[in-house]
Amino acid sequence: MDGNKINRWLTLAANVGVLAGLVLVSLQIRQNTAITRAQIENDYFLADMQLELAMMGEDPAASWITAVYAPDELTPRDAAVVDRYFNYGLVQVQRLQRMNELGLADEEWVDRVDYLRWHLGNEVGRRWWEYSKEGFSAEFVTTVEESLSISEFQGNQQLLDALRARETPEG
């Protein structure tokens, strides 16, 4: 009789162990699925960024300099190049935001939004943002606009001019 009791308890313990194992396997599958989903989303953003870079061509700086110093002289090619440049900056931030939502990046994506003040720190960039912001979430638009509100339209030009300035030795 004692042998039957022991067998029943061992059978019960074994069944509980099997159930616990199944729960752990289920949790691991769920975690792996979430990681795979995040990797696929991250790959999408990276592919989008690669496309943006390719579409900017070999010399995006020339078009960007035109946008900074002579916005009224932008050619259709220049406009296409800076459009991709501006979008590239936003895709970077959106990628970090999404990875944060998935628990794979910290809250520093909000600090990265401040980088957009440089990306959009010219008249053409601000016009681009006004036109393009409709395609983004309200939270994202608010975050970007808070960052942009503390900068000037001519931030790019002011910095580049400061880099170019030469002090003359006092004589």
Image (cartoon, rainbow, N blue to C red):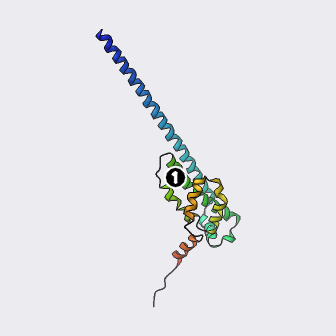
Please provide percent x and percent y for residue 112.
Answer: 51, 58
Q: Residue furthest top?
A: 1
Residue at (55%, 58%) from the top-left corner?
A: 143
Packing grade of label 1 (10 A; few <14, some 14-19, many >=20) is many
Q: Position of residue 166 (x, y in %)?
A: 50, 81
Residue 160, by quadrant, is bottom right
**Number of numbered discs visible in the structure rendering:** 1
Instruction: State whether residue 53 appears in this view.
Output: no
Residue occupying the point 58% across, 57% down: 142
- From the top left corner, tell me how far across and down residue 1 is, in percent: 30, 8
Callout 1 secondary element: helix
Give 156 or 57, whichever is nearer the viewer.
156
Vertically, is 160 above or below 8? below
Q: Position of residue 20 (x, y in %)?
A: 40, 27
- Residue at image position (53%, 41%) is 37
Amino acid carrying mark 1 in the image: Leu
Q: Is residue 138 visible?
A: yes
Q: Residue 167 or 92: which is nearer the viewer?
A: 92
- What residue did someone put label 1 on? 96
Reply above or below: 152 against 30.
below
Left or right placement of residue 68 versus residue 105 in this view: right
**Quadrant the C terminus occupies:** bottom left
